[in-house]
Image (cartoon, rainbow, N blue to C red):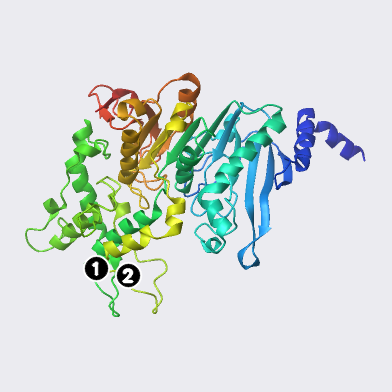
Amino acid sequence: MKKYWLAFLLIPATYAQTSTKCADLTGFKIPGVAMVITKATAIPASAASRAATAETSATSATIPSHCQADGMINERTGSGGKTYGIGFSIALPDNWNNRFLFQGGGGYNGSVRPPVGSAAAGDNPGLARGFAVVSTDTGHKGSTFDRSYDADQQASIDFAQVAVGRVAELAKQIVAHYYGQPARYSYFAGCSTGGREAMLMTQRYPSEFDGVISGDPAMRTGFSGIGNTWSRVAFNQIAPKDDSGRPQPNKVFSESDIKLIVNGILNACDANDGIKDGMVFNTRACKFDPDVLTCKGAKNDSCLTSQQASAIKTAFAGPRNSRGDLVYPMDAYDAGMANLLPSPKPPANPPAANAPAAPTSIDVDQRLFALLGAPLEALTDTTWTNLSTFSTHGGKLLFYHGMSDQAFSAMDTLDYYQRMAKANGGMDKVENWSRMYLVPGMYHCRGGEYALDNFDLLSAMVNWVEKGTAPDYVVATGKAFPGRSRPLCAWPKYAYYTGKGDPEDAKNFECRE
């Protein structure tokens, strides 16, 4: 008995109070709202690392003591007798900084990820800073790329548009109840699907957030699907065939071919930012032509066949319809090119004998016609450019996109940004509340052997919203280049080496247009 009494005495009073206060959340109700908090647990501070996801990098930041409340909104029995409902989890730190952060999802969601808030937050996620952070499964349970929920009408609507708005509204009420006051500022940050959700908040719920960060957004997946199929077809058409006549895309380029292509891009474009450093910052000045690598004689490791060069040019030109209109702009040439070409490595899971063969042709008109009649595409589309309400209430919007994103083209996000600027009074006006950053070498949301993929846009956003300091650039670092830092400049500017000082230090670069 003495042992247990001693253990109780060793528990800090603040933790005991937090534990009681946290547990009481399970009794919190909002009149007229079908929301249940199923579990509320006081969690002590922890220095445990959080593993990386497809959308965010790993973090080893100390997560402070907090209350984590898990809940469900509008639980119901839906199509096929399956249970649906909008699941969520909210982390309420003991040392709250009076801010609320919505953590965007990934893929088709389907699970409630730990509410940490690490998207575009550098090494210091939102929860570690004292933000109250919420995450959601957006209305269904399933694996990341499972779309079986589409059989249920409400589940489709929840994923596409409703869930993030509903969770934002109710999570803010939980925050106000728990702390006895509402959040002073509200932010949203996400990448991929989370980037689409970020755009959704500016377009469908324009007054909910003070600051929104959208990374590599999955804003029109049907169109990116056409673009990616177009690229695969270009390479499949020149791929050697197996015994059953199937294209073998892993045999289109050898490892030495890919190294040759990357070096060709660097030779043509690397020095345009004032220094040859294995990174292409001046994207608009990059005029790489694959034909310069074409063999003059027999194929060898120092040149490409004319078919290989032609396939690259076709793939990166992007799909056009029969009228010649560009349907989807593909990625620009970048040092991370290897991520955008068929890998020479044998597939980990070879296709079954009766599996459909890889496509060697594409009817762009037919694909486009089918897409424009697809109701789910219309539901998830987040390309509306009228952000007048969002901007006039003081909202700030930051975009970032990896230049070697294999899923969604940075050029498509840039195209949206330019069209959005035009629709809202022009770039001179819009840059007062929105900026975009192209990230050289970065893959989808993170990673890349030629990338500096670690940067803190969350701090930049907070400073812009709360102090009025516009983020002309943010400093990026990454494992690919230990000891190196570079400014990521707000488009259309790019990082240019001044010619003086340590070329590994961001302070010796300027943002040049």
Tag shown at residue 358: 2
* SS category of the residue bearing label 1: loop
Residue drawn at x 42%, y 41% is 215
Residue drawn at x 34%, y 26% is 429
Instruction: Answer whether residue 247 is visible to the viewer in this image.
Output: yes
> Which residue bears the numbered disc 1?
239
| Image: 304 above or below 73 | below
Residue drawn at x 84%, y 35% is 8
* SS category of the residue bearing label 2: loop
Q: Quadrant of residue 257?
A: bottom left
Residue drawn at x 69%, y 42% is 69
Q: Quadrant of the N terminus?
A: top right
Residue 124 position within the rendered picture, expressed as x and y whole percent measured from the top left: 52, 33
Q: Quadrant of residue 350?
A: bottom left
> Badge 2, how many Cα within 10 Å: few under 14, some, many 20+?
some
- Depth check: give the residue in front, 218 or 258: 218
Inspect the image, locate mark 2, and give the three-letter code of the amino acid beneath it: Ala
Q: Is residue 238 left or right of residue 31?
A: left
Tag shown at residue 380: none
Tell me if label 1 and label 2 are in contact, CB under 8 Å.
yes
Residue 286 position within the rendered picture, expressed as x and y whole percent measured from the top left: 20, 41
CA distance for labels 1 and 2:
10 Å
